[in-house]
Image: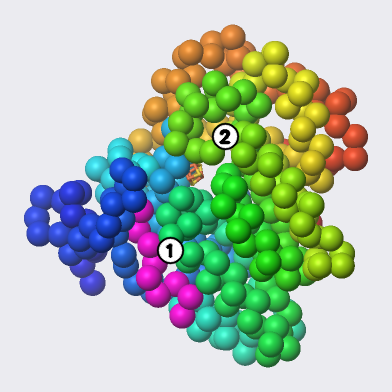
Amino acid sequence: MAKPTYEGYCETKPTKLIKEKFGDTNVYAQNAKSLLTKANGFINAYDFTLNPYRGCQYGCSYCYAAAFSPNTKMRQDWGKWVIYKENAAETLLKELQKWYTKNPQRPPKIYMSSVTDPYQPLESKHQLTRRLLEVMLDVRDNNHPTPTLVIQTRSPIITRDIDYLQRFQRLRINMSIPTGSESVRRDFEPRSPSIKARLNALSKIKKNIDNFKGFVPKISITITPLLPTLVTDEIAFINKLSIADRVVIQDFHPTYNRSLIASTRPEAEEIKQKYAWWYQNQQFSYMKFKDKLISQLTGVEIKEGKDGFGYE
Ligand code: SF4
């Protein structure tokens, strides 16, 4: 079958038209053949990855997922287009039914999401992720155990779904906060929510879910990739991380000029020049920050890279 072509990103007649604009983002709608993708590589501890959207409005300068864009032009324009999977809920339902027919008592382990943010701004309107949570929870009505779920996001919109989140027996929320300095955040990820908003979201989740209301989720803060934090912000930032039970650090992915291989975008390489005090000896900066995490945070697991991304 011919690959779809997207209005604004092709020379010939597009097969997918811009359905709406959301801010400065072109939004396209498309039916997905499947929602659950066999997990491999970095997250092979899971059965599946689940991406409700393709593309991501946050458009972070270092995002490795841009390499999985439909074409080169869209890769360069990462952050300015999103495809939402119109039939996501129905497709997931069918796939889960198939899984539970084969494994009635073994819940799948699902990582949501590997190449998009399931709570990017568009989610506030389309509620695709919310409907997927609903589908995952409905399986309990058929006496199947609810999936083990890890949600990776940097968005406070996740707090909208506390009513559903607290019904997952095995849930980990990974909140991405790669730096403790707002100015650094603005340089590397200018379209994303503030650090404060992300920490407040975790605090709201913790305050609103207790053992009487539901199952308390595990909480990780993923400092991935580890960006510089200004010396003046460092102590306060590390103290705030104690809201999580796990902190994960990791360096940038390498930069490749190839599609379909996780790769740091060239934009981030340029921004790094501004932070030479950190990057001229990146390995040293990384180790120094890691040592500070270990000495300052008690009762919080400190993990690195792949090791930190599992549910357990
Ligand atoms: S939020 Fe995640 S998926 Fe979206 S652009 Fe940033 S790093 Fe990429």
> Does 8 sit left or right of 229 as displayed?
left
> Does 37 sit left or right of 231 as displayed?
left
Part of the protein shown in magenta: 81-90
The crowding category of the residue bearing disc 2, from other C-alpha atoms within 10 Å (few below 14, some 14 to 19, many at least 20), is some
Query: Residue 64: x percent and y percent?
Result: 47, 41
Task: Give the position of the C terminus as an image quadrant.
Answer: bottom right
Query: Compared with residue 82, is residue 191 higher up or lower down, i.e. above or below?
Result: above
Asked if residue 43 shows in the view, the reply is no
Q: Are marks 2 and 1 in contact (CB under 8 Å)?
A: no
Quarter location, residue 233: top right
Mark 2, residue position: 194
Looking at the rendered structure, the secondary structure element under dot 1 is: helix
Disc 2 or 1, which lies upstream in sequence? 1
Quarter location, residue 132: bottom right
Taking the magenta stretch, the answer to whether it contains residue 88 is yes
Looking at the rendered structure, the secondary structure element under dot 2 is: loop
The three-letter code of the residue at mark 2 reads Ser
Query: Compared with residue 5, is residue 92 higher up or lower down, i.e. above or below?
Result: below
Taking the magenta stretch, the answer to whether it contains residue 200 is no
- Residue beneath the point at 53% across and 54% down: 119
The residue sitting at the right extreme is: 299
Query: Compared with residue 15, is residue 57 higher up or lower down, i.e. above or below?
Result: above
Residue 126, numbered circle: 1
